[in-house]
Image: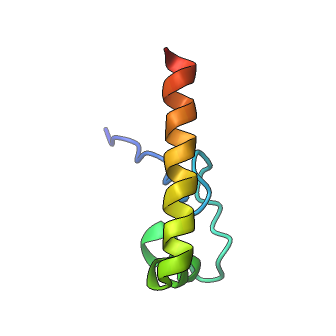
Amino acid sequence: MTTPRPDALCPIRPGEPCTLCFPGADGPANCGLVYLVQDDEELKAAVNAQRAEFNRKARLARA
């Protein structure tokens, strides 16, 4: 019996699954878009702010 692997979440679009939108990627670990965003300090800061806002709203919705 095998345990199913969880679906990977997109680090660029919080709350959404990885849709393999970057050609050749098989998940966030080797996604060129994730690499480009993480390599650019401005984009990385914007995505981190977006993720923080998403997490804040998710916590409020659970409360």
- Residue 14 is situated, as x and y percent measured from the top left of the image, at 57, 51
Residue situated in front as seen by the camera: 62 or 8: 62
Farthest residue to the top: give it: 63
Residue situated in front as seen by the camera: 20 or 59: 59
Q: Which residue is drawn at 40% across and 47% down?
A: 5
Which of the 4 image quadrants contains residue 12?
A: bottom right
- Residue 11 is situated, as x and y percent measured from the top left of the image, at 51, 60
**From what the image shows, is residue 16 above or below residue 23?**
above
- Residue 3 is situated, as x and y percent measured from the top left of the image, at 34, 40
**From what the image shows, is residue 19 above or below residue 41?**
above
**From what the image shows, is residue 27 above or below residue 24?**
above
Residue situated in front as seen by the camera: 7 or 39: 39
**From what the image shows, is residue 5 above or below residue 48?**
above
Q: Residue at x 58, y 45 (%)?
A: 15
- Residue 44 is situated, as x and y percent measured from the top left of the image, at 49, 72
Q: In which quarter of the image is the N terminus?
A: top left
Residue 5 visible? The answer is: yes
Q: Residue at x 58, y 54 (%)?
A: 50
Q: Residue at x 58, y 59 (%)?
A: 18
Residue 31 visible? The answer is: no
Colour mode of the rendering: rainbow
